[in-house]
Amino acid sequence: WDPNDGRKDERKFTLGQLVKKGSQFTYTYDFGDGWRHLVTVEKISKPTGRPDLDFPACVDGERACPPEDCGGPYSYEEFLDALTDKHHPEHRDTKQWAGAFEPEACSKPMLPSVRCLYGQKNATIESET
């Protein structure tokens, strides 16, 4: 972390101190693979004082969370090709490994949590702070 590069030290701030309605920021998941997501803040609510209610919530997103260890964004396209192209030399193995994975379906049961941000190209959250 370099204090002169314009970024904030995440250990010193809460999300509510850094964003407002309409703010957009990049969320990076898994620095090794480099999954990056554009997050748009739709709404900021006043804290209720209840820890079970005062947290960011994902309310929408695009596509499914890629399977763990599929190689990051640079390998994901090859993974999708192998998964969907019956003539791809890795199709059978990829299909078996991925199981019932549906790349175009955002996991609606996960929407109440920030976990849905993993793998979404453009996710939207509500900050409850």
Image: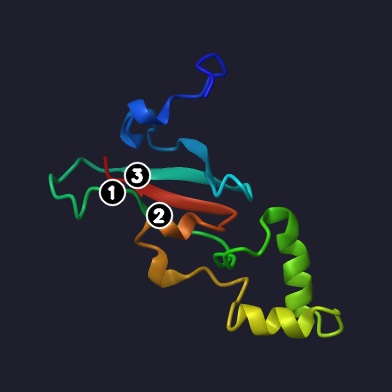
Q: Residue 18: give x, y in percent of width and height.
A: 38, 29
The residue at the point 60 percent across, 83 percent down is 99
Q: Which residue is painted at 39% across and 37% down in the image?
A: 21
Q: Say which element carries label 2.
A: helix
Label located before the other in sequence (3 or 2)? 3
Q: Dot 3: what SS?
A: strand
Q: Nearer the viewer's eye, disc 3 or disc 1?
A: 1
**Crowding near the residue tagged with mark 2, few <14, some 14–19, many ≥20 C-alpha atoms within 10 Å:** some
Percent of width and height locating residue 91: 78, 81
Q: Determine which of the numbered discs, if any, sits on residue 43 in the image.
A: 3
Is 1 on the left or on the right of 103, as rendered? left
Point out the residue furthest to the left here. 49
Front: mark 3 or 2: 2
Q: Which residue was labeled with disc 2?
A: 114
- C-alpha separation, residue under disc 1 versus residue under disc 2: 9 Å
Dot 3, crowdedness within 10 Å: few (<14), some or many (≥20)? some
| Residues at marks 1 and 2 touching, judged by CB atoms closer than 8 Å | yes
Q: Quadrant of residue 114?
A: bottom left
Label 1 vs 2, first from the N-terminus? 1
On the image, the x and y values in percent for residue 14 come to 32, 33
Residue in the image at 78% along x and 65% along y: 78
Report crowding for label 1: few under 14, some 14 to 19, many 20 or more residues within 10 A (C-alpha). many
Name the residue beneath numbered marker 1.
55
Name the residue type under label 1.
Phe
The amino acid pointed to by label 2 is Val
Q: Residue at x 58, y 44 (%)?
A: 31
